[in-house]
Image (spheres, grey):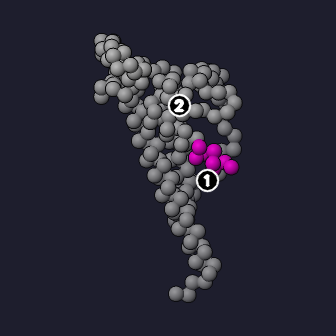
Amino acid sequence: PKASGRHLRMFHSWIKEYEHLEGLQQEVSKTRLALRSFQEFIALPKLPAKMRQEMSLQAMSLGCDFEDYVESSCPHGFRPFDGNPAVDKLMEDLLQKNLEQQELSIQQWTRLFAPRKSAEASLSTNPAILKPRAPVDEWQNWNYVLDLLEVPAHGQADRENLIQTRLVSPDLVDFLLKAVAKRHALER
């Protein structure tokens, strides 16, 4: 009842910070789901040659593009295309590191709401200024995968081109493009 405007503004800023924390927690849930879905997708067995041949005949009889037909009518429990182990590993690592980064951000925001003398509040909140140096083989692997995905050296990756490579599931392409767009918007 005796709160001044200053107190109300402070309380309002706490509410905004807490809502931001809840948004971060929702993002972590989405990233966990994307990681789990991708791991399940890459664990699927590839479509057997006999089924591919039958689908090829069906696609020809319908006058459809074979790859589009396989992708749209692939039976549940099979991966429509072989994929590439380097792309699969890199995408899984990318999702895992993104998840770890989001969880670290949540820990830092949670410390703001922890009691002052608790263990969480006493942990350092200073971000690491210098990033660890990436090994040369990791850079080469990234370049190899980006070449496979036909990502242009300058400019933006196009959703349709990424999907047409048939190396990454359309769901993962959508998730990654949203994540990159969101991060890019935050940097501006």
- The image shows residue 186 at horizontal and vertical percentages of 63, 50
The kind of residue tagged 1 is: Thr
- Quarter of the figure with residue 64: top left
The kind of residue tagged 2 is: Glu
Q: Residue at x 51, y 57 (%)?
A: 21
* Count of residue discs: 2
Depth check, front residue: 140 or 66: 66
In reply to whether residue 142 is colored magenta, the answer given is no
Q: Is residue 47 above or below residue 77?
A: above
Give, as a single range, the part of the protein colored magenta: 181-188
Labels 1 and 2: the sequence-earlier one: 1
Front label number (1 vs 2): 2
- Quarter of the figure with residue 108: bottom right
Q: Residue at x 56, y 72 (%)?
A: 12
Residue 125 is labelled as 1
- The image shows residue 9 at horizontal and vertical percentages of 60, 75
For label 2, the crowd category at 10 Å Cα-Cα, with few meaning under 14, some 14 to 19 and many 20 or more, is few
- The image shows residue 85 at horizontal and vertical percentages of 47, 20
The residue sitting at the bottom extreme is 2
Query: Is residue 106 among what the camera can see?
Result: yes
Seen in the image, is 155 located left or right of residue 26? Answer: right
Secondary structure category for the residue under label 1: loop
Per the image, the residue denoted by label 2 is 160
Spatial separation of the CA atoms under disc 1 and disc 2: 40 Å
Q: Residue at x 36, y 15 (%)?
A: 60
For label 1, the crowd category at 10 Å Cα-Cα, with few meaning under 14, some 14 to 19 and many 20 or more, is some
Q: Is residue 27 above or below residue 131?
A: below
Secondary structure category for the residue under label 2: helix
- The image shows residue 20 at horizontal and vertical percentages of 53, 59
Seen in the image, is 39 located left or right of residue 148? Answer: left
Could you tell me if the residues under marks 1 and 2 are in contact, i.e. CB atoms within 8 Å? no
Depth check, front residue: 138 or 84: 84
